[in-house]
């Protein structure tokens, strides 16, 4: 890929960035490629050293805070006309509840994910409690002169303890997976904001 | 590596690269290459951050019929390097404490 095509492609992929920021970044990459070429590196190779357009976009997405992107996106490109403001205000009883409802749904789905994780933790905790009770039962049965019962209680305790240990790894795994998912979703949202102009 | 620690390290590295004379993007990357591999977009973010916190100033200079941005360290930037050196002494002594148990004195 030559320099011109690289920059054009980058401009296309980053069209969601604020205009000034976009120009600044493009001129930065352009200078980097020019300096490499001046250093005797062939054009194609100089472009390749910068990395692919996709990886550049991904890096930018991971470095820009989401709030900055949204703020830029929400700000209208031009001043709102009088009738638009009137319409926005009059329409508030309609769009405001819809917006709140949409946000509530997203939040609810996210909370349900964490609720699942909490459930697994709770199940794990109760298994651990059963294990303790099982071990305690051994002494009670022995005191009452019932070795068969004691053996049963010991087995039940050990089983519960084993399950609790296994489930503990599962529950930390689930929590980590949710965290990973959160990070991925945030990065995805940012990438789509940067990449697409409405 | 801890993100906060890495950020501080990278800031200090870039400041050190322009400490003695003004430099430009590609030269900074080239000067740092033997020590660490810095990508363009990372450098861009660091330079922006340092400019916003008045550690450096930028000026465009015409070079071979195009513009090239030169970065100049400010008094605050120099100070930041000194602070970094001081911080690092502290970190080194903590490091010695951490590795003391397993007998790896460095």
Image (cartoon, rainbow, N blue to C red):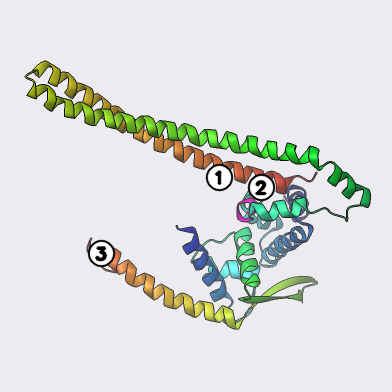
Q: Is residue A110 toward the left or the right of residue B24 in the image?
A: left
Q: Using the image as rendered, state which of residue A196 and residue A25 is in the foreground.
A: A196
Q: Classify residue A97 as left or right of residue B91.
A: right
Q: Is residue A61 magenta?
A: yes
Stretch of the chain drawn in magenta:
A60-64
| Circle nearer the viewer, 3 or 2 | 2
Magenta span contains residue A89: no
Say which of A76 and B23 sits in front: A76
Q: Chain of mark 2?
A: A
Q: Quadrant of residue A119?
A: top left
**SS at circle 3:** loop
The image's mark for residue B104 is 3
Q: Chain of mark 3?
A: B
Pointer 3: residues within 10 angstroms few (<14), some, or many (20+)?
few
Instruction: In the rendered structure, find residue A190 and report the number of the disc placed on it.
Output: 2
Which residue in the protein does label 1 denote?
Answer: A183
């Amino acid at each position: 890929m030559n320099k011109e095509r690289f920059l054009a492609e980058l401009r296309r992929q980053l069209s969601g960035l604020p205009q000034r920021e976009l120009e600044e970044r493009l001129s930065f990459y352009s200078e980097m490629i020019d300096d490499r070429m001046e250093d005797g590196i062939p054009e194609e190779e100089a472009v390749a050293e910068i990395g692919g357009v996709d990886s550049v976009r991904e890096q930018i997405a991971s470095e820009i805070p989401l709030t900055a992107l949204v703020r830029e996106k929400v700000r209208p490109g031009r001043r709102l006309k009088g009738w638009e403001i009137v319409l926005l205000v009059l329409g508030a009883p309609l769009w405001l509840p819809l917006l709140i409802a949409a946000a509530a749904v997203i939040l609810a789905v996210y909370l349900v994910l964490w609720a699942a994780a909490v459930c697994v933790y709770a199940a794990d905790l109760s298994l651990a409690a059963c294990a303790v009770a099982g071990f305690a039962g051994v002494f009670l049965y022995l005191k009452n002169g019932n070795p068969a019962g004691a053996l049963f209680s010991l087995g039940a305790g050990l089983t519960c303890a084993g399950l609790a240990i296994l489930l503990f790894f599962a529950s930390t795994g689930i929590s980590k997976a949710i965290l990973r998912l959160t990070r991925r979703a945030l990065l995805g949202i940012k990438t789509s904001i940067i990449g697409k102009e409405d | 590596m801890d993100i906060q620690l890495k950020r501080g390290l990278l800031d200090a590295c870039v400041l050190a690269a322009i400490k003695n004379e003004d430099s430009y993007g590609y030269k900074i990357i080239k000067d740092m290459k033997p020590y660490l591999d810095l990508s363009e977009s990372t450098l861009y973010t660091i330079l922006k951050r340092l400019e916003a916190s008045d550690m450096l100033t930028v000026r465009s200079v015409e070079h071979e019929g195009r513009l090239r941005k030169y970065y100049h360290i400010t008094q605050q930037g120099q100070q930041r390097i000194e602070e970094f050196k001081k911080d690092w002494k502290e970190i080194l002594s903590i490091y010695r404490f951490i590795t003391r148990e397993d007998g790896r004195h460095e």
